[in-house]
Amino acid sequence: MNGSDIYKRLIGLIEDRVLKPGDRLREADLAEEFGVSRTPIREGLKRLEAQGLAVHEPNRGMVVPTLDHGQINEVYFMREMLEGTAAGLAAKHASQPEIEIMQDIVRADRQRMADKDSLVRSNRDFHRRLCLASHNRYLVDLIEHLRLSLILMAGTTLDTPERRETAVEEHAAIVEAISRGDSDAAEAAARLHIAHAHKTRLQQI
């Protein structure tokens, strides 16, 4: 297991809330847990730090960081701009199979409102496919970096049934605009969706 493998394992542990903001990332403990030497652990932690998913704290060493109010606002500001752009580009460049897959996700999500965990996973898939449908690799990379920042936030904006239903219908509006090839409407719908998620996130703090 090399440094890249360790990095991916650590990302998964943070995403699954096994490692939470504030938790220490001790080389010795991680080396024992993963059954490797400290060298790949050190490499993985350096990459994690470069992504902003690990920071050094005085007297504590490396820890999983906690985003403050200002950082949350910054992340959602960038998400609104970038994912809005991605949706606008998807309206111009998405293939019919890509559109149909997003439509399938929306239809399936309407049937699993009560299953929060399943809906959270599906939500990630929808946003990933929306970004890929932009057919702009640089935009996809930027949005993926922001997604990694989101895993540092506690809980999910889909905690309440009301928000789940609204979010799925917002997804439907985005896909509908993309299917019509309406770039302006797709961007506006995506921006509105992220703005509502931002408001929900701030209400949870």
Image: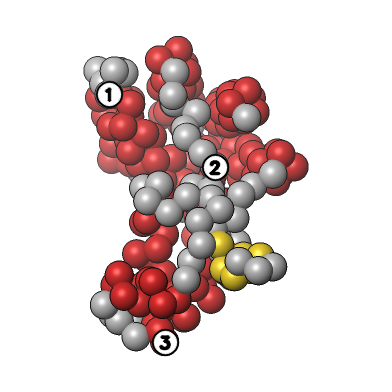
Task: Residue at 58% x, 26% y: name it.
Answer: 204
Q: Is residue 183 above or below residue 108?
A: below
State the SS at label 1: loop
Q: Which sits earlier in the primary sequence, circle 3 or circle 2?
A: 3
**Tag 1 residue:** 115
Amino acid type for the residue under numbered disc 3: Thr
Amino acid type for the residue under numbered disc 1: Asp
Residues packed near mark 3 inside 10 Å, few (<14), some (14 to 19) or many (20 plus): few
The x and y percentages for residue 56 are: 64, 68
Name the side, left or right, on which 75 lies relative to 20. Answer: right
**Tag 3 residue:** 39
Q: CA distance from mark 3 to mark 2?
A: 29 Å
The x and y percentages for residue 36 are: 30, 81
Indicate how the structure is coloured in the image: secondary structure
Report how many numbered discs are placed on residues in the image. 3
Q: Which sits earlier in the primary sequence, circle 2 or circle 1?
A: 1
Kindly indicate whether the residue at mark 2 contacts the one at mark 3 (C-beta within 8 angstroms).
no
Q: Relative to the observer, which residue lies in front, 115 or 86?
A: 115
Q: Which sits earlier in the primary sequence, circle 3 or circle 1?
A: 3
Amino acid type for the residue under numbered disc 2: Met
Name the side, left or right, on which 74 lies relative to 178. Answer: right
**Tag 2 residue:** 153
Residues packed near mark 1 inside 10 Å, few (<14), some (14 to 19) or many (20 plus): few
Q: Is residue 17 above or below residue 123?
A: below
Instruction: Classify residue 97 by image quadrant.
Output: top left
The x and y percentages for residue 184 are: 61, 30
Judge whether residue 68 can be spotted in this image. Answer: yes
The x and y percentages for residue 71 are: 70, 46
Q: Nearer the viewer, mark 3 or mark 1?
A: 3
Task: Residue at 38% x, 71% y: name it.
Answer: 30
In the image, farthest residue toward the front: 59
Task: Residue at 41% x, 59% y: name it.
Answer: 11
